[in-house]
Image: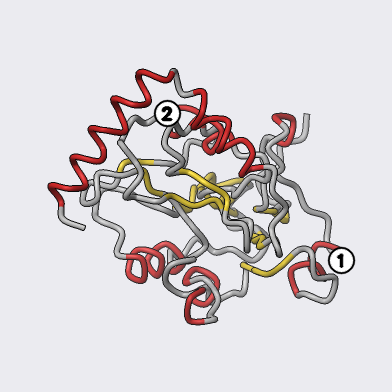
Amino acid sequence: MSNSRRLFLKGACIAVVGASGFTLARAKSTSATNVEPACKYALVHDETKCIGCDACSIACREVNQVPEGVDRLEIKREGPFGEYPNQQFHFTRISCQHCDDAPCVKVCPTGAAYKDPKTGIVCVDEWKCVGCQYCIAACPYQVRFINPVTKAADKCDFCKETRLKENSLPACVSACPTKALTFGDITDPQSQVVQVLKSTPSYRSKTDLGTRPKVFRIASQSGEIEL
């Protein structure tokens, strides 16, 4: 599809959306969110094993051709905690949470944001995206951005269009030198990700919002503050 045709379609979408008040598109996206996928991919980040080396974010950028200035995946560093020489840092993964009940999908007026019916991965169809940024505003995890090359909303998609198509693990998982990341289908009781979640206490971010995120975290003990 040529750029001119894409721009035409975007303009047409904006006009239609403005006239309809988003009713039809939002109803479609809501119904799509409620469809149960054939499997549900999830990720576990073991913060006790993470060393903040950035191998995951570098691999993500290279494999998915993420432009400079934006990130699908970041590692947030906090610390140091404790007294020298026993100081430690706390590393937190910042990326799309692939919510079961995704606010970004609900507000998208064109259906560009959607949940893949096969994998449960929250995706973006860049050809449908009109750059309205409603999904960016709706995301409670603040992990979406406008790709400066495609001009469409972008974020982590678990390497759905790259590594998963090759039946390989997401780039971040393969690149991690300490095996701090585990990926798999949480509907499969025999999967590694389920075994990890069964054997180790974990937590998820902002579960009080009802989004049911599919990125789980094993909490690092370092950095806790005792009151």
Judge left or right: residue 127 versus residue 140.
left
Q: What residue did someone put label 2 on?
A: 134
- In primary-sequence order, the first of circles 1 and 2 is 2
Residue at image coords 52%, 36%? 104
Please rate how many residues cluster around mark 1, counting C-alpha atoms within 10 Å: few if below 14, some from 14 to 19, many from 20.
few
Residue 152's disc number = none
Image x and y of residue 110, in percent: 41, 36
Residue at image coords 64%, 39%? 31
Judge left or right: residue 118 versus residue 71.
right
Judge left or right: residue 218 versus residue 73.
right
Q: Residue 74, relative to residue 172: is it above or below? A: above
Residue 5 or 36: which is nearer the viewer?
5
Mark 1 or mark 2, whichever is nearer to me: 2
Q: What residue did someone put label 1 on?
A: 199
Q: What residue type is labelled 1?
A: Ser
Residue 117 or 24: which is nearer the viewer?
24
Where disc 1 sits, the SS reads helix
Locate the N terminus and report the quarter of the image it occupies.
bottom left
Locate the C terminus and report the quarter of the image it occupies.
top right
Image x and y of residue 47, in percent: 65, 58
Q: What residue type is labelled 2?
A: Tyr
Residue at image coords 61%, 44%? 32
Residue 103 or 11: which is nearer the viewer?
11
Image x and y of residue 183, in percent: 64, 68
For residue 29, which quarter of the picture?
Answer: top right
